[in-house]
Amino acid sequence: MKRILAQCVKELAQFRRDRLTLALAFLLPIVTLFIFGFAIRLESKNIPLVVQDFDHSNLSQTYIERLYATNQFQPVRWSDDAPVQAAIDKGIAKAAVIIPPDFNRRIKAGKQTAVQVLVDGTDANNARVIKNGIQATTNFFLSNDGPASSDQQVQAHTRLWFNPGRKESLYIVPGVYAVVLWIFPSLLAAIAMVREKEKGTILQVYASSLTASELLLGKALAYLVVGLSEALGVMVLGSLVFRVGFAGDPTPLLIGTPIYLSAAIMFGLLLGVRSGNQNAAVQGVSLVGFLTAFLLSGFIYPLSNIPFPLSILPNIIPARYFIIVTRDAFVRGIGWAGVWFDVLMMIVIGLFLFNVARRILSRMQLPD
């Protein structure tokens, strides 16, 4: 234990003397939090919409006002004489609504009325959002301003659970915590291990009585302290800037964060053991660590959308489990009943990474 603590103290001393590493550890995570927290938006807003009204009645004007009152669409000026397809072709509008000349008469007569909607399908996801938004607004218009309200025998009263205000930050920011706390601790640990090789000090370790487990645990303990400081910094800033606070029992997050950081650090140490220089270590963390944590963890894209056999890979990515822990702590608030399995999986993956790194490093050491 004394040798592990001595290795930890030595690593922290080297860490404090390197200003570039200090910036990498504390400045870049904050910048990443702000970029992801402010830039990523999953709900489309201010979509340019052109409406061509051939009816010019009070009812058609009410329908147009309903469309723009959602704050999802913004009006685009367009002449009734010009074809609306040109507005979409030129990229001026993403959607167009054409109201027929008999709109008011047919609605008051209780007849079906065809309103033509043209949507730019270049972005399939955005097109689906526009279609659903216009459809929902049309249904709301008919139920409040048209005679169809008297025919509706079933009305659905919807309540949003966990996030009634539909704040996107409650979904994005907890996910950013998982990505940031996977990338930077693992990157620091990988660079620290490779630096031992580049400076030649690893040969002294190989020839000493220090075991591979003691070396790995000493470095891991040092960067666990750094990682916990990073976690405290980004979570406090996230709470202050994005108004993301605890929704329930915080103990799964308090216990799961050190476990997750340990797995991230072990991943970085494993890459450091296998890499021959810092460039290779950084590229390994960037390609393997960042891409999997960003794309295959459920941070933005649902895991159910990932096709087989790639859908198997998220099961061994710790970020996938920590995102569930963070979103439970800051959004759902269920507690251990909902996340115990995720914490267990992070422990299993962390131990596996440690065992692989220990075996590789043991084979490199000189025999006694």
Image (cartoon, grey):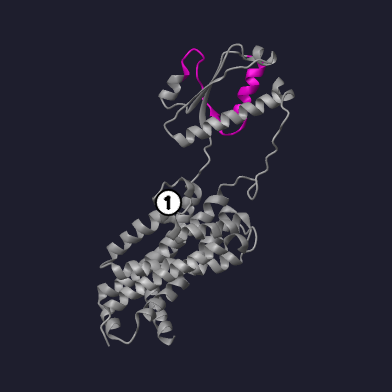
The answer to whether residue 78 shows anywhere in this view is yes
Amino acid type at image mark 1: Ser
Q: Toward which corner of the image does residue 351 lie, by quadrant?
A: bottom left
> Where residue 129 sits in the image (x, y, percent)?
52, 35
Q: Residue reaching furthest front?
A: 309
Residue 80 located within the stretch drawn in magenta: yes
Seen at 38% across and 54% down, the residue is 291
Residue 200 picture quarter: bottom left
Q: Position of residue 314 (x, y in %)?
A: 44, 55
Rendering coords of residue 110 (x, y %): 69, 16
Residue sitting at 56 percent across and 56 percent down? 327
Above or below residue 368? Residue 251 is above
Q: Is 30 on the left or on the right of 64, as rendered?
A: left
Task: Please tell me whether mark 1 sits on a helix, a strand or a loop.
Answer: helix
Q: Is residue 188 left or right of residue 327?
A: left
Q: Is residue 36 magenta?
A: no
**Range covered by the magenta-colored residues:** 57-84
Q: Quadrant of the C terminus?
A: bottom left
Name the residue nearer the viewer: 309 or 36.
309
Residue 232, can we see it?
no
Residue, disc 1: 311
Residue nearest the observer in this picture, 151 or 319 = 151
